[in-house]
Amino acid sequence: MKPAIPVPRRDVVGRMLPDVSMTVADGRVFATGDYRHRKHLVLILFPEPPGAAGIPHLSSLSSRYEEFTMENAEILAVLPAFPPGSSARGGHPFPVFEDRDGTLREALSGKPAPGMSCPTVYVADRYGEIFRSLEVPGGDPFPLEEVLSWLRFLERLCPE
């Protein structure tokens, strides 16, 4: 079995992350712009609400979250909705957002949430510029090492 290879999306590289407000699992409202000039961002858009079992990628990200913080980065997981009783609502060291109206999804992917076929990862610098974007086909492991490599590059590029 050959290892899964994430699919790069070059159409968004060089663009700025849109400043969109979203609701966090605890009800607070944040905007992607709240992190600007402070942290690099790993923004993950999930195509469908998780079931009660949650999303496997969130567990692997949680277990290695400290590596992201060491590179001055924050992970933002974005779901279309929080289903009742879902484990995706909490228990993660990073914010899990809800993009109910799909504003962020459409701004980044050009298609509404139902049109997304797999999770999409965006790696942006602390100023909001997207440096890397990957689609992670269903069932494939999350490209942790590649994302961390991009964060290390960004931290060296703009260490202030």
Image (cartoon, grey):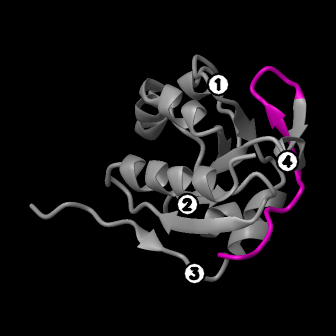
- Nearer the observer, 106 or 38: 38
Residue 116 seen from this side: no
Mark 2, residue position: 120
Labels 3 and 2: the sequence-earlier one: 3
Q: Indicate the position of residue 148 as horizontal and vertical percent values.
A: 47, 48
Closer to the camera: disc 4 or disc 3? 4
Q: Nearer the viewer, residue 108 or 82?
A: 108
Question: Around disc 2, counting alpha carbons within 10 Å, would you say few (fewer than 14), some (14 to 19), or many (20 or more)?
Answer: many
Whether residue 89 is situated above or below residue 80 in the rendered picture: above
Quadrant of the drawing holding the N terminus = bottom left
Chain-order first, disc 2 or disc 1: 1
The segment highlighted magenta reads 13-28
As drawn, the label of residue 89 is 1
Of marks 4 and 2, the one in the foreground: 4
In the picture as drawn, the residue positioned furthest to the left comes out as 1
Which is closer to the viewer, label 2 or label 1?
A: 2
Instruction: Pick whichever of labels 1 and 3 is earlier in the sequence.
Output: 3
